[in-house]
Image: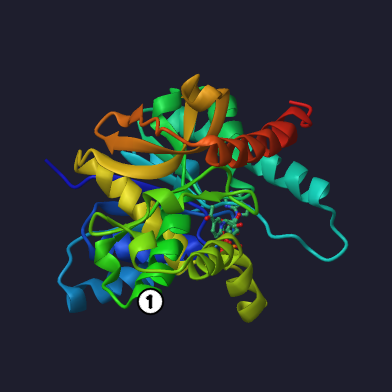
Amino acid sequence: MGRKKIALIGGGQIGGVLAQVAMQRELGDVVLYDVVEGLPQGKCLDIWEAMPVVGSDARGNGTNDYRGIAGADVVMITAGIPRKPGMSRDDLLKTNLGIMKTVAENVRQHAPKAFTIVVSNPLDIMVYAFQRMSGLPTHMVCGMAGVLDSARFRAFAAEAVGVSVEDVTAMVLGGHGDTMVPLTRFCTINGVPIEHFLAPETIKTIVERTQQAGGEVVALLKTGSAFVSPALSALEMAEAYLHDKKRVMTCAAYCDGEYGVKGYYIGVPAVLGENGVERIIELPLDADEKSLFQHSVDHVKKMIDEISW
Ligand code: A3D
């Protein structure tokens, strides 16, 4: 029995970290696909040459040929182009939907059994588009956003309380963006509600910082967006699938009536294991949480319904 095969579509900032950490942890052998000639090959060669230092026998291959992803167990998609000067959001969306169509057709052709994790933005649209364009089973396709948003919330909360990040649990639901819903009621320090440790104003500051955390990094970097935290978050999800962990993670999952959402992908807590998204956990949201969640869902639906498919 050989190692698992992990195909990464997009060899940019996130793709590079995904390749490095997946190989370092021996999660599987990596195939890194990108349209830019030499980029995925160069990154993989560099990472592979580092493996003796960290004691990993995982292999990494860069390619510009989709046949390289054949038979992958996991596919992670970060392909896309960032907005260029003078380009409208609509133009960007059109271009990136075009890219997703090619990706979807090739994953369907070469790796139809894979568990696919979409990372490309706008996340909730891209994961919907990938599933729709590939026709792959909805439970085998999901999007990464909630794990990252929750990780950010946990980092800020742990720092404010003065405890280990390991002891903070948090859940951020809804779409990935300004409308995300950090559920403070379900945030605990080793089971003890966060309200026991922090004043309401402090919690509010943490919620707002979480909602704007992506932008905070962009403003500092200036030439790109966060790439280490999204990569590690996506890998947690891949690992839950590959090791059949049954982890409870917030991810953009296909809802078929759960939370009153039918036929769309949205950030909800789900169990990830060998069958992909095995089930969605429905939390008893209170009236305020429900209305914030609904607002987020409506925002995602509106964007999807405006696209001429
Ligand atoms: P970047 O470094 O630009 O990498 C994107 C890669 O996609 C580049 O190497 C391109 O060459 C490649 N690419 C372009 N067209 C194609 C194509 N047709 N087929 C295959 N590859 C192609 O970006 P990044 O790695 O920093 O980010 C990747 C995506 O993730 C972007 O859409 C980001 O907005 C998104 N992102 C999402 C989150 C979430 O939490 C959901 C966080 C951060 C970034």
Would residue 115 be found to the left or right of residue 273 on screen? right
Q: Quadrant of residue 276?
A: top left
Q: Nearer the viewer, residue 144 or 291?
A: 291
State the residue at coordinates (39%, 47%).
7
Q: Mark 1 packing: few (<14 Cα in 10 Å), some, or many (20+)? A: few
* Camera sees residue 71: no
Q: Which residue is mark 1?
A: 159
State the residue at coordinates (30%, 42%).
248
Quarter of the picture for ligand 1?
bottom right
Q: Nearer the viewer, residue 161 or 143?
A: 161
Q: Is residue 234 above or below residue 99?
A: below
x, y (%) of residue 184? 44, 54
State the residue at coordinates (50%, 19%).
257
What's the residue type where badge 1 is placed?
A: Glu
Residue furthest to the right in view is 86
State the residue at coordinates (40%, 30%).
282
Quadrant showing the N terminus: top left
